[in-house]
Amino acid sequence: MKAVTYSSTGDSSVLTLGEREEPHPGPGEVRVRIHVSGVNPTDWKARRGSGPSDLPRPQVPNQDGAGVVDEVGEGVTAFRPGDRVWVWDAAYQRPDGTAQELAVLPERLVVALPDGVSFDEGASFGIPALTAHRALTSYEHAPTELSPGSLDGRTVLVAGGAGAVGHAAIQLAVWAGATVIATVSSHEKAELARAAGAHHVVNYTDPDTAKAIGALAPRGVDIIVEVNVTANVELDVKVAGANATIASYANSPEDDSVTIPVRPSMSKNLRWQFVLTYTVAPESKAAAVRAVTAAAADGVLKVGAEHGLPITRFPLERTAEAHDAVENGAVGKALIDVI
């Protein structure tokens, strides 16, 4: 079977396409024929590493994907060959990501794809949607698992509303009943945030972003889904309402530190939540997987330019180009057609 692997960390040139022996599932495992593999920033960051280093065994990149169950191992009863599925965290502490024709995964990392949901959508869930769900549910008064109406009466601010996590956060928050404000840096990105469902969009390059957000949310926002806390910490504290949560899932590559204004945070009883989807508690991760699947079944989490997340496609042999596109900040989602 065809697979992309790398045997040492480095730039995208370490990725090579070759043939591997077909794997077979063991007890409790599922073999998925991957149709579409999704690329996220975490994929190129893992591949690049912190410096050149040889790996103990070849690594197949990419955490997310979607396809069809091809074979099941002993004890697996939830799936059978032919089932359409999406997968998550495929390459986390494992050598077998989704940039290959056949991937063997533990059953818990394989999720039934609802009827009518495309492989493109399934390959776009994983890291972005599970991260967005955790950010939204880190609010003290939010449920542990989102559902329609579960955020009624709440106001959500999504920083970077045109990114993959921001896109998923907008869609999930609207599905859950929240009023959503998104911040973006251009007219084009504003249109994407609106297409995703944001009720209000603010260009953060305008002179007084805090005033614009304050006019839309006079009592302050309840949940902030933050992509760059170092740059936005002062703005976030200004626009947050009492007992709000600021959930940060990323930061500026130039500066990995943040100075939190303690007294203003204390006066509003703010909660600061940092999110890394890989290490989210298992029960929270399971809730996110269920909610994302339910939202998809309800027609939420659509992808494509008309839904606010443009798709750029690559064949498997151009996986390195897909990684480069994401590393260089391409707007939208990079997807790899595996078969």
Image (cartoon, rainbow, N blue to C red):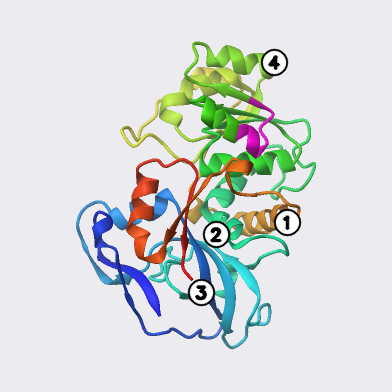
- In front: label 2 or label 4: 2
Residue 298 spot, x, y in % from top left: 76, 53
Residue 105 shows which numbered tag?
Answer: 3
Instruction: Give the distance between the C-alpha atoms of the residues marked 2 and 1, in whole angstroms.
Output: 16 Å
Kind of residue at badge 1: Ala
Residue 266 occupies quadrant: top right
Q: CA distance from mark 4 to mark 1?
A: 32 Å
Q: Position of residue 212 (x, y in %)?
A: 60, 14
The residue tagged 1 is 294
* In this view, 77 is above or below 336: below
Residue type beneath disc 3:
Leu
Helix, strand or loop under label 2: helix
**Percent position of residue 209, x then y:** 54, 16
Amino acid type at circle 4 is Pro
Q: Nearer the viewer, mark 4 or mark 1?
A: 1
Nearest to N terminus: mark 4 or mark 3: 3
Residue at 46% across, 40% down: 331
Q: CA distance from mark 2 to mark 3?
A: 15 Å
Q: Which mark sits nearer the N-terminus, 1 or 3?
A: 3
For the record, the magenta segment spans 193-200
